[in-house]
Amino acid sequence: MTPSPPRRPTALIADDEPLLREELTRLLALAWPELQIVAQARNGREAVEMYEAQQPDICFLDVHMPGLSGVEAAREIGRRAHLVFVTAFDQYALKAFEHGVLDYLVKPVEPARLADTVARLQERVGTAQPAQATEALLQQLAVQLQRGAAPAHLRWIRAMVGQTVKMIAVDEIDFLRSDEKYTLIAWRGDGGKPAEALIRTPLRELLGQLDDTQFAQVHRSVVVNLRAISHVTRGLNETADIYLKGRSEVLPVSRSYLHLFKQM
C-alpha cells in the first residue's frame, strides 16, 4: 500500500488590509512553499471564527484590527495554534518576544526576518506543542491597545504603484496632498528621484499618525515634511509659498498656518 503523502502545515492570516494579506501570502509562498494558507481574515472576530472552522497550525495575527484586535483573538485561540504577531509597532512585538512565548514580524515584513520566523515554525510544527502565551502577557498587551499605547508615528505607508505594493518610508516623503477621494504621497524614490502615488486613506487620518515635529499642515489640503523645505516666500493677503529641495512643486501656505513661519 502506497503511504499517503505527509500532511502539509496550514496557516491563517488575519489583517484588515487586503494588500498586506496578499503580500504576506506571497512572501510565505516563497519562504515556505509547503505551507498552505487555508483562511484569510479581515479582523479578529473573523480570525477566531475561521480558526474554529479550519483549525490551522499557525495563525499570523495583525495586532491592530477593528473590533477584536489580534491580541484579543490570540487570547481566544490560546495554545491551540502557533501564534505570530504581525505589527507596525515594535513595542508590542518586542514585549511578546522577550517573554519567549510568541514570535513576531514587523511591517513591512522583510524576507530575511520572515525566513528566521519560518525556520522556528518549521521546527515547532508537528514536533512540539504551541508555545504557551501566558494569559497575563496577552492581557497586558490587550490593555495597552485599549489605552492607545501604540506609537502615533507612522514609519511606512503602503501604496499601489502599478501592480506593485510599494512600502514608502515616511522619512522619504516630501509632502502629502488631499486629492478628492485620495491622498497624493510625494516622496523620493529610487536614487532620490521624485515619485508619487495615490492612496485611499484620508489626509486628516494620516495627519494624526505623523510626527508633528517633522510634518506640518500648511494648508487644509497640504502637509509638508519640514526637512524637505528649501525656502518659504511671503505672498499677498497673509499667505506664503513653500519651495522644496529637488522638486518643482510649490506648496501654498494659507493664512491659518502662516504662524508656522513667523520667523520670516
Image (cartoon, rainbow, N blue to C red):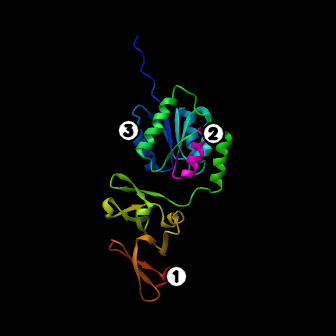
Where does the image place residue 13, in percent across and percent down from the top left? Answer: 49, 41
The residue furthest right is 136
The residue drawn where x is 53% and y is 25% is 127
Q: Which residue is mark 3?
A: 30
Mark 1 against mark 2, which lies toward the viewer? 1
The residue drawn where x is 59% and y is 34% is 131
Q: Which residues are magenta?
A: 86-100
Q: Compare residues 54 and 194 and report the one nearer the observer.
A: 194
Badge 2: residue crowd in 10 Å (few <14, some 14–19, many ≥20): some
Instruction: Say above or below: 97 vs 219.
Output: above
173 part of magenta stretch: no
Cβ–Cβ under 8 Å for marks 3 and 2: no
Instruction: Say above or below: 34 vs 182.
Output: above
Q: Earlier in the sequence, mark 3 or mark 2?
A: 3
Q: Earlier in the sequence, mark 1 or mark 2?
A: 2
Asked whether the viewer can see residue 179, the reply is no
* Kind of element beneath mark 1: helix
* Kind of element beneath mark 3: helix
Badge 1: residue crowd in 10 Å (few <14, some 14–19, many ≥20): few
Q: Which residue is mark 2?
A: 76
Where does the image place residue 32, in percent across and percent down from the top left? Answer: 41, 35
Tell me the kind of residue under disc 1.
His
Q: Earlier in the sequence, mark 1 or mark 3?
A: 3
Mark 3 against mark 2, which lies toward the viewer? 3
Tell me the kind of residue under disc 3.
Leu
Where does the image place residue 95, in percent across and percent down from the top left? Answer: 60, 46
Rendered image quadrant of residue 156: bottom left
CA gap, disc 1 and disc 3: 52 Å
CA gap, disc 1 and disc 2: 51 Å
The residue furthest bottom is 236
